[in-house]
Image: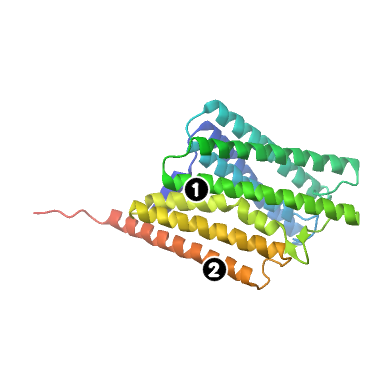
């Protein structure tokens, strides 16, 4: 419990812009929990273009993103005006986008690719503009982190590697938009879910890419506290990065081949191996943290 409290303390926001983003993160995570109740009242209907799954998934996803960007900002050189502008723009655009998704779900309307009536088409267009603003903010944070890189190598891996994965996720998201628009043009209706080929779930690699930064942040914070040589900690952080990146490649190829995420193949096997590698690394870090906690509790020896 002591180590968990220490890790939580390392994740807490320090600057005002970071606290703003953490506040937004908390709001949307709570909103996601709230919509679980709405999903239950709707008979747990998870699939389809109109489902309370959407506000749950998007609320949790944007909450994690806002908190991650807040953590990143606190690890970059202090630039109050830039930080404030980024925080407010990111929070406002992300909140409006996810808020419109929730609004459409409560209205019983599809939120994405619903361009058949004026009001729905306008909402989808506004969502697109908000996604553009979110993307712009993330690009600025990435450029900032590349120009003024964090000094700590573990933090540098988490920040730059995580943001690069987020950029990859945004690119896959644009691909999803194109697939959805093609479906609408071809069929004249909203897709139940956007797929590639027979059953490739386009949102699968998108989610993997978009949330790698949280894995890297947790790994960096934990590795900063273990009592291991610096070279060993850097090696473990590199292993986390490359295992996760390999998992993204396997998930992407599985999708491009038109196969579902759980469909057995050499690519899904590769994804499993990547996940097992991550599990082994985090298990070793957890043991090292437990060992450090045990040493901290040992009474000091005295010589009489």
* Residue closer to the observer: 108 or 34: 108
What percent of the width, then of the height, locates residue 3?
40, 53
User: How packed is label 1: few (under 14 Cα within 10 Å), some, or many (20 or more)?
Assistant: many
Q: Quadrant of the N terminus?
A: bottom left
Residue under label 2: 273
282 sits to left or right of 256: left
Determine contact: label 2, label 1, CB under 8 Å.
no
- Disc 1: which residue: 158
Q: CA distance from mark 2 to mark 1?
A: 21 Å
Sequence-earlier tag: 2 or 1 = 1
Among all residues in the image, which is located at the extreme bottom?
264
Residue at the image position 65 percent from the left and 33 percent from the top: 89
Pick the residue in front: 215 or 61. 215
The quadrant the C terminus occupies is bottom left
Can residue 36 be seen here? yes
**Residue furthest out toward the top:** 81
Q: Could you tell me residue 24's position as x and y percent?
A: 61, 40
Where is residue 272, by image quadrant?
bottom right
Q: Is residue 29 visible?
A: no
Which residue sits at x=80%, y=53%? Answer: 180
Q: Identify the disc placed on residue 212.
A: none
Where disc 1 sits, the SS reads helix
Q: Which x, y percent locates residue 291?
A: 33, 59
> Tag 2's secondary structure?
helix
């Amino acid at each position: 419990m002591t180590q968990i409290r220490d890790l939580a303390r390392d994740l807490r926001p320090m600057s005002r812009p970071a606290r703003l983003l953490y506040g937004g993160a908390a709001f949307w995570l709570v909103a996601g929990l709230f919509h679980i109740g709405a999903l239950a009242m709707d008979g747990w209907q998870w699939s389809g273009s109109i489902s309370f799954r959407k506000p749950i998934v998007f609320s949790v996803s944007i909450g994690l993103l806002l908190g991650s960007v807040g953590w990143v900002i606190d690890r970059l050189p202090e630039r109050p005006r830039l930080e404030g502008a980024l925080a407010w723009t990111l929070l406002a655009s992300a909140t409006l986008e996810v808020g419109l998704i929730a609004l459409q779900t409560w209205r019983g309307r599809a939120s994405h690719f619903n361009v058949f009536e004026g009001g729905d088409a306008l909402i989808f267009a506004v969502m697109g503009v908000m996604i553009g603003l979110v993307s712009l903010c993330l690009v600025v944070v990435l450029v900032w982190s590349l120009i003024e890189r964090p000094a700590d190598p573990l933090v540098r891996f988490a920040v730059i590697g995580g943001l690069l994965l987020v950029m990859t996720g945004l690119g896959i998201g644009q691909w999803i938009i194109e697939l959805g628009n093609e479906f609408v043009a071809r069929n004249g209706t909203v897709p139940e879910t956007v797929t590639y080929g027979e059953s490739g779930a386009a949102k699968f690699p998108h989610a993997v890419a978009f949330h790698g930064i949280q894995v890297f942040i947790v790994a960096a914070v934990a590795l900063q506290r273990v009592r291991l040589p610096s070279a060993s900690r850097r090696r473990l952080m590199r292993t986390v990065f490359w295992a996760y990146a390999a998992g993204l490649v396997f998930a992407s190829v599985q999708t491009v081949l038109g196969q579902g995420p759980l469909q057995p193949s050499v690519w899904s096997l590769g994804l499993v191996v990547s996940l097992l590698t991550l599990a082994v690394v985090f298990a070793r870090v957890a043991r090292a943290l437990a060992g450090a906690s045990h040493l901290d509790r040992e009474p000091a020896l005295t010589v009489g």
